[in-house]
């Protein structure tokens, strides 16, 4: 069997800031359950590491890593969770901080992380057949293996997979870092494989040197090869399209299950939906809306322009003014967008609630208690919320882009087939028309609405199929 080491800057349940953390938990676990020999390596953020897992952590060894001219301590810790072995890379100077990202020296912090991974492989006696790397924080490792560590015989057979979770974030730094951090010359820069408008680009280096590049949905894999979505890397992605594919992320079908979820007011399933109405009333009560039998539309999202929240702000006024509806929003984000939603709450107190907060339990209650789920993202590499919403029988209304296009089948008014509502033209008035259509189907054709709902609830969004695609890819590379 192909031996794999999965490397990422974050992984739930230890720490996560978004989808990368979710995937770094779920995909390795799914691969482990498929009996693939896999281990995971992440930083040890000492201030953020959950206390309940501390007793599982064991010290393995420590050594020093050269970061340019500096010599830095590197500790290797380990723990095993659900049978899966994790390595934690420890350096208090780099990782003993209050947050994971957002520091002036992030380039140096993740340069150290990547060097430490390369240095530890021989020392821990785990040389993988495939190194699976994720986003810019680990994307430079294929360059290091080819340029800095090519003299180590044991490393020569290692194949690399780079997964792009969001191409907006690339790791762009002054070329001085090649010497001052990585301790390598300028060959890769001069030949253009890591050069990016006069700087060094970690992501570009990974795309160029990795043996395979994946991203988190088939549509996003196509989109990032175009100027509109490629964030100035579309050219290099087109050049490397022969090794690029999209593999859709999954969700944990056992955790996100309305038949067993302990966070919701009443359990229900596709064969017995009676609990859905109980959850709607519980949600209305929890957020302070009148307990009325009207459609409840919801948002659980970062309140940012990437998530289409500016579009929603523009579309909401007409929707709230003309329809007997309630809308619940949960999330935090850009201050101007937060304030815009607060304004709607003041204007439509009996119809609209904005919870400017991060609340995992309330999110589950929103999935369970809402009828429709609004997700008008400008771009969406994969998206998990629309899958969770469908699992709970909340019908998604989405901009048909990236992973939203791959997971939500737009409702066909003639055949009644579909799992949600999708629009292509990214305009506020088009989103408004789609909200109106969803309302009208709910209001005038409950039979069609229930059909859409049930078609969504019966979709298989589990990790098993995606994990198998990764197994096949690893095997293909290792052969």
Image (cartoon, rainbow, N blue to C red):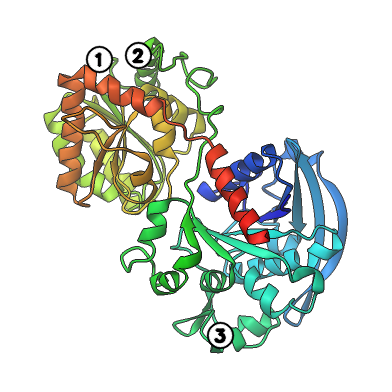
Residue drawn 51% across and 58% down?
A: 214
> Callout 1: helix, strand or loop?
loop
Is residue 406 placed above or below 88 in the rendered structure?
Answer: above
**Vertically, is 196 above or below 257?**
below
Residue under pointer 1: 293
Disc 2 target residue: 277
Quarter the C terminus occupies: bottom right
Q: CA distance from mark 1 to mark 2?
A: 9 Å
Q: Are marks 1 and 3 in contact (CB under 8 Å)?
A: no
Left or right, 328 with reference to 145 = left
Q: Nearer the viewer, mark 1 or mark 3?
A: 3
What residue is at 40 percent from the left and 21 percent from the top? 286
The Cα–Cα distance between marks 3 and 2, rounded to whole angstroms, is 60 Å
Q: Nearer the viewer, residue 358 or 384?
A: 384
Q: Quadrant of residue 363?
A: top left
Circle nearer the N terminus (1, 2): 2
| Mark pair 1, 3: CA separation | 62 Å
């Amino acid at each position: 069997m192909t031996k794999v080491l999965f490397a990422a800057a974050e992984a739930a349940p230890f720490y996560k800031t978004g989808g990368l953390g979710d995937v770094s938990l779920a995909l390795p676990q799914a691969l482990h359950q498929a009996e693939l020999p896999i281990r995971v390596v992440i930083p040890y953020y000492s201030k953020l590491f959950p206390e309940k897992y501390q007793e599982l952590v064991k010290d393995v060894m420590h050594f020093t890593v050269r970061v340019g001219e500096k010599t830095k301590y590197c500790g290797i810790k380990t723990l095993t969770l659900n049978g899966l072995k994790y390595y934690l890379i420890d350096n208090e100077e780099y990782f003993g901080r209050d947050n994971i990202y957002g520091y002036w020296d992030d380039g140096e912090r993740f340069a150290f992380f990547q060097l430490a991974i390369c240095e530890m492989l021989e020392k821990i006696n785990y040389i993988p057949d495939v190194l699976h790397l994720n986003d810019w924080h680990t994307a430079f490792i294929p360059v290091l293996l080819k340029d800095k560590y090519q003299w180590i015989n044991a490393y020569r057979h290692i194949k690399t997979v780079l997964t792009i979770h969001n191409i907006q974030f690339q790791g762009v730094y002054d070329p001085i870092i090649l010497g001052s951090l990585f301790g390598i010359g300028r060959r890769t820069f001069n030949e253009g494989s890591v050069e990016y408008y006069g700087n060094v680009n970690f992501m570009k280096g990974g795309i160029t040197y990795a043996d395979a590049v994946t991203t988190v949905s088939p549509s996003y894999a196509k989109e990032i090869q175009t100027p509109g979505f490629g964030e100035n890397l579309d050219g290099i992605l087109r050049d490397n399209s022969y090794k690029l594919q999209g593999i859709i992320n999954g969700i944990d079908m056992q955790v996100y299950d309305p038949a067993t979820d302990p966070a919701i007011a009443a359990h229900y399933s596709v064969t017995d939906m009676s609990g859905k109405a109980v959850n709607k009333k519980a949600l209305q009560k929890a957020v302070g809306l009148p307990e009325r039998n009207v459609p409840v539309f919801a948002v659980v999202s970062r309140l940012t322009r990437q998530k289409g929240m500016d579009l929603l702000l523009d579309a909401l006024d007409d929707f709230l003014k003309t329809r007997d509806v309630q809308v619940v929003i949960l999330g935090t984000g850009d201050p101007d967008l937060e304030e815009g939603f607060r304004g709607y709450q003041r204007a439509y107190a009996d119809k609209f609630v904005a919870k400017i907060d991060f609340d995992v339990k309330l999110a589950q209650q929103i999935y369970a208690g809402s009828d429709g789920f609004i997700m008008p993202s400008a771009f969406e590499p994969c998206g998990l919320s629309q899958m969770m919403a469908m699992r709970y029988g909340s019908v998604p209304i989405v901009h048909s882009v990236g992973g939203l296009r791959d997971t939500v089948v737009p409702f066909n008014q003639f055949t009644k087939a579909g799992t949600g509502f999708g629009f292509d033209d990214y305009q506020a008035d088009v989103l408004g028309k789609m909200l109106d259509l969803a309302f009208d189907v709910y209001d005038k054709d409950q039979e069609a609405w229930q059909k859409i709902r049930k078609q969504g609830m019966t979709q298989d969004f589990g990790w098993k199929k995606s994990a198998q695609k990764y197994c096949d890819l690893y095997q293909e590379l290792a052969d």
